[in-house]
């Protein structure tokens, strides 16, 4: 009985401090110091409608846009997940065959592997710089603009996520597509 | 490859260095009365909160009874929150009632510091459930493990064990809470969200509706990593771009996974007053974990087998189930540290690791002591030490001793029971589910990889790890109940037995160590201990490994 009472007293104390106090303190720091990312980096149009989150991939299938990596959950931002297929699975070969066809990849111009492999959460907002350059010709043709103009968008957006630890530069797919469409955001 | 090596050394070396001062701090926080030191003022506050029972010195039985009673309360409180979430506040997205067997599994899972998740957080759980139910247990269940280690170490030092109710508060308020706040702020700075607003509905550039779940993530993730809990706010855990948005948030989280398990070894050394012995244990653990990291990074640098027949570049490692922002070696490194430490969070899908790379996390969970869960990892290692010194004593024909305590049949029996029960839960559970529809109907992959999914799930439950080969359709009543029972037994047996050993040892007269005593501070002891761990582990689990990942590798990898 004493054990129970003591446990309940500690329950109340830890709930108050580790749940109430701690959560409120972390929330307050977030609102004060990083208000944008604390709210999940939401992007809105000039008219106030929401386009998406900078941090979360969204589906792009039209030829005039950069395409993100494949998603096992069709870019469901409210139910994320990976394929969970073994790398030896024939299901992956079938899925990748469709991806290869969509990009029109050939043995002379093979598809970068990161565009064939689905990400862990199905919401990876990035592709590598080389995967972006792989798509330049299609986008330029669909928009009827010079390849150089598309290349410039990549140049402006490429970044190294971990400095000296990450040799491959990445680009954010949604941010590049916003730049291509020249969308005004708030 | 050079970057991969530098990255791994940077993370491991940096964390090992940090663990030294943190271990010192933990020994001050957990054991202020050691030697001639003055008790810190917190002790009387914690005695006040705990009530009259918190003022008693406890023997091992009372300590265990208090620990178990406390856990019953944790389970009941969170069971109630889970069962009533649809009626409770802080539920902006209107999450509904949960299935009873899932409630049982989840309450057990978080009480036992496992955080096996047969649900997807952003789909099933309200913000109140996530914070007051699950995050609360991430604090106090981790504190239970640290308390158990502190009591064990005091017993080995020949002192009274202390009081559970004071210890659990010391671990919660003095160790976990300040560390979690620091890590949560670092996570905010590296891009992790912390909001109480509900999900957002977006209209994408192509005009499609996308609902984006979010929530109070930063606070949750900090203690999830520090307490070797591992339960994700979102379904895909730290692979989710809102749970782990940048390269640097990934660095902060990787360090947070291993810092306290490492520091626990130093805390143990401080309390028993044998830092050189702790350094030997630390080295053994680091070597066992380091070997698996090297192997996993190597195995995972092989390109995705399923793509080899297609016009796809073969110049990068396997990227299925991985996020690009963390860099090439971050996934394999994390896969090893999260399973070495009974954490169980993931930043890549383990189901999609190459076959032998996917075996390394399983080995980590089978051994479960380098560095192991907060507190309990070192407690598990104590069982291997007892067996190791017994075998060594037999080999050289001396009475086996550990720190001056004579190790005899009773202690060795208890230690072996603890170690063998681990194998029993994993192998019997896997065998039953592999031959019945309970397991066979829930697989996401065929052949040996399907077997690996079952083997992994039971390994994860028995190691109180919580990661999974997540393709497995484990949200069924048989899985919920079976893994729930395994988690309970596998949590408390390896806490009770070591404390029982302490009870048995401390009834004996302690010998003074002489030149004839087998040293616990040299390379011979390190080699003996490593061999004990490897041989016990290999004898128990190698046959199962050959049916799963090894068979898959031989059959399919060219």
Image (cartoon, rainbow, N blue to C red):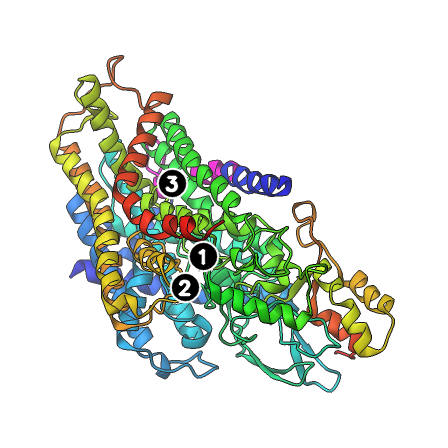
Q: Which residue is mark 2?
A: B470
State the image coordinates of residue B447 (x, y, percent, origin top left).
Answer: 36, 60
Residue B483: where, in percent of width, then height? 27, 62
**In the figure, B206 relative to A127: above or below?**
below
Mark nearer the viewer, 3 or 1: 1
- Residue highlighted by disc 1: B350
The answer to which of B241 and B354 lies nearer the viewer is B354
Earlier-in-chain disc, 3 versus 1: 1
Look at 37% across and 66% down and name the residue there. B472
Q: Are marks 3 and 1 in contact (CB under 8 Å)?
A: no
Labels 2 and 1 in the same subunit: yes
CB within 8 Å, label 2 to label 1: yes
Q: Residues within 10 Å of mark 2 (few under 14, many from 20)?
A: many
Q: Residue at x 21, y 54 (%)?
A: B428
Residue A151 quadrant: bottom right
- Whether the magenta-drawn stretch holds residue B129 is answered as no
């Amino acid at each position: 009985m004493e054990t129970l009472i003591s446990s309940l007293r500690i329950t109340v104390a830890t709930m108050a401090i580790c749940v109430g106090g701690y959560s409120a303190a972390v929330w307050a720091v977030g609102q004060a110091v990083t208000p944008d990312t604390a709210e999940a980096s939401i992007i809105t149009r000039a008219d106030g409608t929401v386009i998406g989150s900078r941090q979360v991939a969204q589906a792009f299938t039209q030829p005039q846009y950069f395409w993100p990596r494949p998603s096992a959950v069709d870019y469901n931002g409210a139910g994320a997940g990976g394929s969970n297929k073994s790398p030896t699975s024939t299901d992956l070969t079938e899925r990748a065959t469709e991806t290869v066809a969509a990009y029109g990849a050939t043995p002379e111009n093979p598809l970068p592997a990161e565009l064939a492999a689905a990400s862990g959460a199905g919401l990876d907002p990035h592709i590598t710089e080389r995967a972006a350059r792989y798509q330049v010709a299609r986008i330029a043709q669909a928009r009827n603009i010079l390849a150089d103009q598309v290349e410039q968008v990549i140049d402006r957006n490429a970044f190294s996520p971990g400095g000296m630890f990450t040799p491959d530069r990445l680009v954010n797919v949604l941010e590049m597509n916003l730049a291509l469409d020249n969308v005004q955001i708030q | 490859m050079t970057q991969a090596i530098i990255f791994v050394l940077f993370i491991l070396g940096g964390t090992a260095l940090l663990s030294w001062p943190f271990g010192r701090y933990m020994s001050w926080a957990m054991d202020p009365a050691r030697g001639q030191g003055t008790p810190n003022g917190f002790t009387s506050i914690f005695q006040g909160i705990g009530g009259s029972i918190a003022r008693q010195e406890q023997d091992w039985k009372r300590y265990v009874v208090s620990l178990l009673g406390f856990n019953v309360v944790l389970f009941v409180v969170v069971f109630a929150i889970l069962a009533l979430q649809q009626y409770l506040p802080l539920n902006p997205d209107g999450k509904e009632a949960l299935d009873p067997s899932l409630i049982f599994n989840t309450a057990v899972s978080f009480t036992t510091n496992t955080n096996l998740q047969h649900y997807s957080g952003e789909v099933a759980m309200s913000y109140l459930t996530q914070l007051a139910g699950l995050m609360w247990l991430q604090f106090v269940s981790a504190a239970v493990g640290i308390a158990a280690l502190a009591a064990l170490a005091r017993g080995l030092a020949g002192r009274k064990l202390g009081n559970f109710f004071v210890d659990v508060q010391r671990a919660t308020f003095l160790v976990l809470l300040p560390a979690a706040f620091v890590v949560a702020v670092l996570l905010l700075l590296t891009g992790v969200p912390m909001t109480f607003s509900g999900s957002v509905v977006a209209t994408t550039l192509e005009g499609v509706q996308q609902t984006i779940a979010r929530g109070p993530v930063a606070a949750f993730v900090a203690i999830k990593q520090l307490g070797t809990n591992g339960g994700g706010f979102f379904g895909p855990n730290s692979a989710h771009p809102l749970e782990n948005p940048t390269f640097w948030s990934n660095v902060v989280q990787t360090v947070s996974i291993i810092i306290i398990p490492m520091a626990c070894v130093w805390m143990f050394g401080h309390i028993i007053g044998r830092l050189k012995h702790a350094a030997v244990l630390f080295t053994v653990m680091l070597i066992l974990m380091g070997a698996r990291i090297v192997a996993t990074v190597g195995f995972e640098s092989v390109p995705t087998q399923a793509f080899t027949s297609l016009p796809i570049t073969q110049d990068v490692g396997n990227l299925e189930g991985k996020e690009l922002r963390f860099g090439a070696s971050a996934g394999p490194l994390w896969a090893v540290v999260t399973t070495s430490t009974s954490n169980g969070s993931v930043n890549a899908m383990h189901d999609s690791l190459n076959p032998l790379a996917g075996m390394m996390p399983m080995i980590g969970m089978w051994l479960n002591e380098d560095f192991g869960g907060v507190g309990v990892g070192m407690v598990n290692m104590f069982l291997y030490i007892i067996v190791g010194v017994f075998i060594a004593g037999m080999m050289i024909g001396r009475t086996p001793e550990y720190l001056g305590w004579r190790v005899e049949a009773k202690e060795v029996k208890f230690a072996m029971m603890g170690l063998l029960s681990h194998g029993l839960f994993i192998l019997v559970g896997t065998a039953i589910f592999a031959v019945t529809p309970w397991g066979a109907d829930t697989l996401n992959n065929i052949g040996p990889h399907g077997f690996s999914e079952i083997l992994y799930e039971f390994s994860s439950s028995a190691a109180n790890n919580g990661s999974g080969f997540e393709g497995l359709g484990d949200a069924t009543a048989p899985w919920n109940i079976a893994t729930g029972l395994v988690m309970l037994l596998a949590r408390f047996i390896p806490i009770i037995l070591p404390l029982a050993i302490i009870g048995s040892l401390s009834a004996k007269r302690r010998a003074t160590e002489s030149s004839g005593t087998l040293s616990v501070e040299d390379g011979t002891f390190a080699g003996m201990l490593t061999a004990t761990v490897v041989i016990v582990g290999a004898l128990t689990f190698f046959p199962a490994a050959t049916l799963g990942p090894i068979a898959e590798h031989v059959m399919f990898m060219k």
